[in-house]
Image: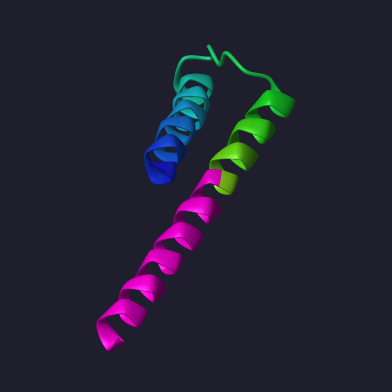
Amino acid sequence: MFLIICALIFSIFVLNVVLGAFASASFMGDVPEMVTLFIASLFFVAAILKRESDAKDQAENSNS
């Protein structure tokens, strides 16, 4: 779930960058762009930590 949210937010960031580079029609300024990338990074870290926690739990259950 966290990884899907991260991908959606990051795609908004990429869309803004691509529109700004090729069409001069970026819809976010510098600060909202930075906040968008920061939030995508937070969701990515949360997804990785959750996946590591699930793998650890699964390893502990299989060793029991």
Q: Quadrant of residue 34?
A: top right
- Considering only vertical position in the picture, is 33 above or below 41? above
How far from the left and from the top, in percent, is residue 3?
40, 45
Magenta residues, start to end: 43-64
**Residue 58 included in the magenta stretch of the image:** yes
Relative to 59, is 48 on the left or the right? right
Report the residue at 47% width, 26% height from top.
12
Type of secondary structure dominating the magenta stretch: helix
How far from the left and from the top, in percent, is residue 50?
46, 58
**Of the pair 38 and 15, the residue shown nearer to us:** 38
| Furthest-front residue in this view | 64
**Of the pair 20 and 40, the residue shown nearer to us:** 40
**Residue 52 included in the magenta stretch of the image:** yes
**Of the pair 22 and 62, the residue shown nearer to us:** 62
| Furthest-bottom residue in this view | 63
Relative to 5, is 38 on the left or the right? right
How far from the left and from the top, in percent, is residue 29?
68, 20
Q: Looking at the rendering, in which quadrant would you find the N terminus?
A: top left
Relative to 41, is 55 on the left or the right? left
Report the residue at 64% width, 29% height from top.
33
Q: Looking at the rendering, in which quadrant would you find the C terminus?
A: bottom left
Q: What color scheme is it?
A: rainbow
